[in-house]
Image (tube, rainbow, N blue to C red):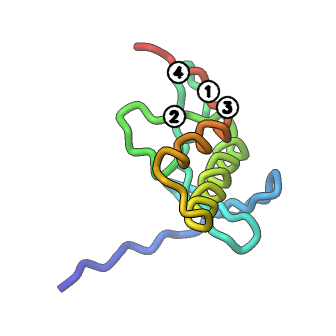
Amino acid sequence: MAAKKAKRELLGKKREGGFTFHIYENDTDVYKGQRHLGTIIGMRERSGRHCFRLGIDMRRKPRKYRGRVKAATALLIIDDLKAAAKKNKWSLDELVIHAWDGKPEASPRQED
C-alpha cells in the first residue's frame, strides 16, 4: 500500500515581478501565467538576511538568491533552457554553454 502524500495548506498568494507565488508553510510554488516553474524554499544567510534557494538544488551548499523574484527568474531561465534543449535537440555540451550564458546573479558565496 502506497503512503499518501501529505496535503499542503496554502497560506497565501502573492503577485510580484510578473510571477505568482503560492506560499505554503515550508516552501513556495512559482508560476508564470498558468505554467508552474518550480519551487523555492526560504532560508537565512549567516548574516540573518532572508534569502531563497531552488527546490531542485539539493547540494550541501545550495546557491542562494536574495529576493523571491530573483529565484523565480532563475526558475524561468531553467524552464526556458529545458524547452529550447528539447526543441533544438541540443547535446549536453550545448546545453551547458547556453546555461552559462543565461546564468542569473546570485548572492555572493560565503566561505566557511
The furthest residue to the top: 112
Separation of disc 4 and disc 1 at Cα?
6 Å
Give me the C-alpha separation between circle 1 and circle 2.
8 Å
Find residue 22 and report its image quarter.
bottom right
Label 4, residues with CA under 10 Å away: few <14, some 14-19, many ≥20: few
Residue 57 appears in which quarter of the rendering?
top left
The amino acid at mark 2 is: Arg
Q: Nearer the viewer, residue 79 or 43?
A: 79
Residue at the image position 22 percent from the left and 82 percent from the top: 2
Residue that mark 4 sits on:
109
Residue 31, given in percent of the width and then of the height, sits at: 68, 64
Residue drawn 68% across and 45% down? 68
Q: Quadrant of the N terminus?
A: bottom left
In this orientation, does residue 102 appear?
yes
Q: Is residue 29 above or below residue 44?
A: below
Residues tagged 2 and 4 counted as in contact (Cβ below 8 A) = yes
53 or 93, which is in the foreground? 93
Q: Are marks 4 and 1 in contact (CB under 8 Å)?
A: yes
Query: What kind of residue is marked 3?
Result: Glu
- The residue where tag 2 is placed is 63
Q: CA distance from mark 3 to mark 2?
A: 10 Å
Position of residue 6 measured from the top left corner of the image (x, y, whole percent): 38, 72
Location of the C terminus by quadrant is: top left
Helix, strand or loop under label 4: loop
- Tags 1 and 2 touching, CB below 8 Å: yes
Rendering quarter of residue 20: bottom right
Residue assigned mark 3 = 105
Q: In whole angstroms, how far apart are the C-alphas of marks 2 and 4?
A: 8 Å
Which tag is nearer the camera, tag 4 or tag 3?
3
What's the distance in space between the residues labelled 3 and 1, CA to CA? Answer: 7 Å
Which residue lies under the disc numbered 1? 107
